[in-house]
Amino acid sequence: MVSDETFTPEFYNKLKTFKPMLKLRLAAGANGGRKSNAKGSSVEFSDFREYIPGDDIRRIDWNAYARFDRLFVKLFMEEKEGIFQIYLDASASMDFGTPSKAVHAKRLAAALSYCILDSSDRVILNVLKNDHIETFPSTAGKQGFSRITDTLSSVRFEGANDLCSSIMRKDLKARGMSVIISDLYTHDLEAVLKYLTFKKQEIMVLHVLSPEEISPEFHDTLNLIDSESSSELKVTAANSLYRDYKRTYENHIRSLKAVCKKYGARYVLTPTDSDFTRICS
Amino acid sequence: MKFMYLWPLALLILIPVIIIMYLMKQKATDTKVPSLFLWKEMYLNRESDTPWEKLKKNLLLMLQIITVLALVLALMGPYIKGRSEVTGSVAVLIDNSGSMSTRVNARETRLDKAKDAAVNFLQTLPSGTRITLIVCNDSANTLVSNTMDKTSVVSLIKDIRPTTYAGDISGGVKLCETMKVSDPTLTIAAFTDTYVPIENAGGTFFGLSGDLPNAGVNYVNCGYVNGSLMVLASISNHSKTEFETDLNLYGDNELLAIQSITLSPGETRVVYFENIEFDGSVVAVEINREDALDFDNRAYSLSENAKSAKVLLFTMQNLYLEKAVALSIGEPPRKSNDVEMLETFEKEGFDLYIFDGLVPEKLPETGNIFFINVPYDDLFTVAKELDGKYVKIEDTRFTPSIAGSSFGVSKVNAMEYPIWAKSFLSVEDEGHTFTAGFIGETGGRKICALSFDIHSSDLALRMEFPILFYSLINELADTSVLAENAFYCGNTVRIASVSDSGVSITSPDGRKKSYSSSMLNYKDTDMPGVYVFNEGVESEERFVVNFASTESGATGISSEYAESVGTSYVDVSENSVLDLRFFLIIFLCLLLAFEWIVFLRK
């Protein structure tokens, strides 16, 4: 259960300093505040070209005509609206840790949404739960931020979830950026990235882990119970066990980074005890 | 490799128990985690380890199983045996007399060594050998006869306990000689420290000797001289080296005097403690130094008996005799040179009448009698008169620690002693042995006789003189219920009480036993010390039990000695059986240490 203290005044104060680098190359889509490869109508001059019939005569540079006795039209940078898909893993495994992974994930989603909205882009929040995806209405404009936080506050982290099957239910039509916020306990991340790349998505993977998952510490013998599948595993505290776990964890991170690199995705590990404003900076 | 026991195989049940315990391990606490994803990955990696790494992970289990196996193996007593020449049957004679308590090193006694050697010897025997086990001390006791079950014999050997009794294996050897008549294949394996001829029965000595220093108090006597106590003690050094020690004199367990002595190897010396102010009951002399045998370091004597006797001495002049009697009874005896006055003196009621060279017309009606150089045909006969002879001291209870020695006599009457008496001095002539001194009891009185004049012998100049006369006077002057008051460990104390209410005896360790019978043969004299005998409520007497000096002097059988007497001999230090238990125990210790290290590292 996520506490009501997810979006605290401190969080909002930190938002002001949060300026992530969200690079997105766009050539189509609705007009927005993001520079695009397309030429269009904006105040930002881009280039000249010779007039051809059919061009808007309002764009003919009459000064150039006076100097060269040829008709040129001014080309302006087309500013497009970037579409950001945020996939929030809301499985039970995310509701764990001190500080809570769920709180951390929600704050990340909210902070990214704030920046996206701030740069006149559009954000679409997708909550992944029980192998399904729940897509909330897209939001644009800063005034929509409160709706985002309200939506995030209402998200409950429960049940099991298969990241791959739930994301692949999403039918993406427009180019944009997909941000996955998850603890990534899956072998199918590559399938997800392949699918999103195919759908012309720039990808950012935010890996959320609690300190207990990075370096577990316990004594005696424990019967570990999986929060999602309820399967059990008996382990006895021992230095060799810690060593093996650490090695497995490092291998896992290494393989995640390799997969992300393969598909040009950006991988960011964000432990819950770290400051979210530092990511993507 | 063979095994002594098979029962430890039952302990193999521990191995499945360990494995089950490993499977059950400890009770786990349920703990919820977000995902087992990484944990399962980790175990997948572990399962892909090489077989050696898999083994390494279960090293503790493997070590524990190996430890149990090694323990079981050690308990089974594995050994590699040598060859034994014994065929048919064997009689194992183990001496557990007092001398076998002598230490051969800091940890083990001769008996421990003998038991180990006997067990090792049994292991070398071919299966099918019939074994008879005989334990010898003051008597021979057959524990098991003609058995082929080595295990039960080993168990019986291990249960043999040391005794304080005087003795050797002679009783066992006689038994074996009898057995050999019906079983000619019988051989003897003798584990003893005292040589006894076994060649007739055929057998081997397993030599037990040690070089640790040992000295013993052979004997303690005491008497009152001019109101002060005089104590004499005979001390022997049985070591091959000089023995220096303090001698402590105790009176009723309080230290009265100390003397330092140094004894050369094999030396026996009589030590006197004079002018001791003591009015108690018991004196003890103790060697104040730890040596190979503890039992012989202390000897006791009753001082209370020395005071009570009334003795009348008829003599022309015999200073030696007067002094000896005075030492025993604590005061100079009444003395007379006129036997005609016997009737007058008799009215005073003396406990002992000594006739030294003077013949009475008739004997007093009560009291004991000691004849010295007096022929008295009514009681004994003189066979012949001999000149220039050596008189030998016989081994009796009146000749403690001086038996075997002899002294010269210029003129001695060779006597034939009566059937009720026992000879303690003997003289040989033309192949015949006559007595020169006897003591016995007849007609309710004790009679003792010496057949030579003390002045015509060198006895009075020898250290045996005070010891012999103290014993004789003490015996003759004693009128107590107890026939004797000084015994050796293992002796039977004969008690003839007049009380109807029964008697009780308290041993030196404070244990009290009551007996309803007034005629009693008390046999629990295995502990040296002072025993208290109670007859009714008021009557109390004491007797002392000492460790036999013959046991103290048993120095063991060396290979040189065995060679000199021409007997078969095996040095027990040359073990024909390689006992593997020692190596297994070392291996076990190393295993446990390794297991501990593995446990810590894990």
Image: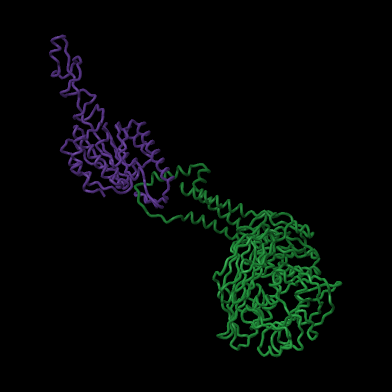
Chain colours: A purple, B green
Residue extending farthest to the right is B430
Vertical placement of residue A13 versus B453, above or below: above
Q: Residue at x 60, y 58 (%)?
A: B106
Work out whether residue B550 can be spotted.
yes
Indicate whether B290 appears above or below B224. above
Q: Quadrant of residue B475?
A: bottom right
Q: Is residue B208 above or below residue B439?
A: above
Residue B591 in picture, x, y percent from top left: 54, 50
x, y percent for residue A245:
40, 43
Q: Position of residue B391 (x, y in %)?
A: 78, 71
Q: Judge from the rendering whether residue A179 lies leftward or rightward of residue B581; answer left or right.
A: left
- Nearest the viewer among A239 and B256 is B256
* Towards the viewer: B136 or A154: B136
Residue B575 lies in quadrant: bottom right
Left or right of residue B468, residue A136 in this image = left
Q: Is residue B520 visible?
A: no
Nearest to the observer: residue B439 or residue B23 = B439
Q: Position of residue B248 (x, y in %)?
A: 58, 66
- Count of numbered circles in the view: 0
B483 on left or right of A195: right
Image height check: is B424 above or below A148?
below
